[in-house]
Image (cartoon, rainbow, N blue to C red):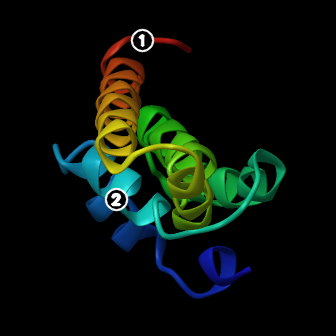
Amino acid sequence: AIIHNWIPESWVETVLGGDNPFGVVLATVVGIPMYADIFGTIPVAEALLAKGALLGTVLAFMMAVTTLSLPSLVMLRKAVKPRLLALFVAICAIGIITVGYLFNVLPIF
């Protein structure tokens, strides 16, 4: 609701649109501290797309929220060693950012 009603479309286009080459990285970093499942991110993704964010940027945000959320990492920390957890985060982050940029560059629609 905040994205729909309070955040201006021009701001979303500037930060997450095609003019910002770091929009995918920013969306990934912003998604990490959030805690939601994939169904909770769908309304946010729809609102961001409606406001002018690029598809790859929105996908990167959604994947970061579901894969690299802080609560998930805290639970994983109980099961794996810190070095393996760091490797998991690095591989996932690189994959998420790569997919985001690919979807922004390739003409999907």
Residue 36 occupies quadrant = bottom right
Q: Position of residue 37 (x, y in %)?
A: 76, 53
Q: For the residue marked with disc 1, what is the amino acid?
A: Pro
Determine whether 47 is above or below 106 in the image: below
Q: Identify which residue, 2 or 109, lies in the foreground.
A: 2
Q: For the residue marked with disc 2, what is the amino acid?
A: Val
In the image: residue 27, left or right of residue 18: right
Q: Secondary structure at mark 1?
A: loop
Disc 2 to disc 1, C-alpha distance: 25 Å
Quadrant in which the N terminus is drawn: bottom right
In the image, which is nearer the foreground, mark 2 or mark 1?
Answer: 2
Q: Position of residue 103 (x, y in %)?
A: 42, 21
Q: Residue furthest right?
A: 39
Q: Residues within 10 Å of mark 2 (few under 14, many from 20)?
A: some
Q: Identify which residue, 32 or 27, lies in the foreground.
A: 32
Determine whether 84 is above or below 58 in the image: above
Residue named by callout 1:
107
Q: Secondary structure at mark 2?
A: helix
Q: Residues within 10 Å of mark 1 (few under 14, many from 20)?
A: few
Determine whether 100 is above or below 67 in the image: above
Question: Tag on residue 29?
Answer: 2
Q: Answer with mark 2 or mark 1, whichever residue precedes in sequence.
A: 2
